[in-house]
Image (tube, helix red, strand yellow):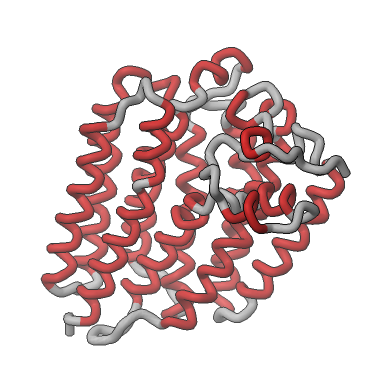
Amino acid sequence: MPQPTNTTEDRVIADARPDNWVDRWAPAVTRPYLKLARMDRPIGTWLLLWPCLWSIALAAPAGYWPDVVLLVLFGIGALVMRGAGCTFNDIVDRDFDGRVERTALRPIPSGQVSVPQAWIWLLALSLVGLGVLLTFNGFAIAVGVASLVLVAIYPFMKRITYWPQVFLGLAFNWGALLGWAAVRGDLTWAPVVMYVGGIAWTLGYDTIYAHQDKEDDVLIGVKSTALRLGDRTKMWLWFFYGIQTACAGVAGWIAGLAWPFYVGLAVSAGQLAWQARNVDIASSSDCLAKFKSNSHYGLILFAAIALGIRFGG
């Protein structure tokens, strides 16, 4: 296997911080695999995890904090399953990635990892994720297994539709259903409404993200909402983020959350409004910064739900 080059400029993939821990501290032989799992770029793990944590908090008994053990298990699951999904995505997109400047240094197109090695790594990550899933109740296990269909089809959608972000949203927010199922062993309208809102949230943040690649996407024939919406993106962001805020509010109302939730919901809505108002879709660096700020949004909403449950009842 070719060894990574020695200069920071040559080693660091575009989305990662120059001082990311993988390039600084991980043994050289492990770096390509950790990068396949995007462990040098943790924002995706957070975006996958937040709907899980929202739902776990939403499902907690009134007057209690969310279950810490479940929060930790879902954190491990999000880390490895996001890594497995990204590995699968890179296997499928290896020819496209080599033709796009931002993704050309990914381990498969750059030759650091072969396709068979990537499949073995995918299997290893999936087994860890399965181990986490099997600690849940039977209903939650069934809900978790059902998500694999969405994970499998998402990488192909950018070849078919200008709305692949819808399918990303369906997959990335499945935790809004799974978290509730893991706590309560069923599903009700509260997690379903939260799930619908999460899809709209993903449409917003991933449209911002996709504006980084729009020129390359045109050249190689890949579709995205960034290309579909173009200069109307900011108007649509208000729409997407408005749906997310409304759905989060309705889910909290159904679950009977107390007044601290609505205070936190207003703060979280302000964060989304800041994104929609200020994002510069012509600047790749600003798009990346606004995209990453959604981790702050996720934390604010989680705190709002947890406080609303703790002081409710």
Observer-nearest residue: 233 or 156? 233
Outermost residue, top side? 219
Residue at the image point whose x is 86% and y is 46% from the top: 116
**164 sits left or right of 198 in the view:** right
Q: Work out whether residue 82 can be spotted.
A: yes
- In the figure, residue 81 lies in which quadrant? bottom right
Q: Where is residue 41 in the image (x, y as percent from the top left)?
A: 54, 49
- In the figure, residue 254 lies in which quadrant? bottom left
Q: Where is residue 194 in the image (x, y as percent from the top left)?
A: 33, 58
- In the figure, residue 101 lies in which quadrant? top right
User: As displayed, is residue 200 above or below residue 50?
Assistant: above
User: As displayed, is residue 181 above or below residue 212?
Assistant: below
Residue at the image point whose x is 43% and y is 38% from the top: 206
Residue at the image point whose x is 41% and y is 31% from the top: 285
Q: Position of residue 154 (x, y in %)?
A: 59, 41
Which quarter of the figure is the N terminus placed in? top right
**121 sits left or right of 23 in the view:** right
Q: Where is residue 153 in the image (x, y as percent from the top left)?
A: 63, 42
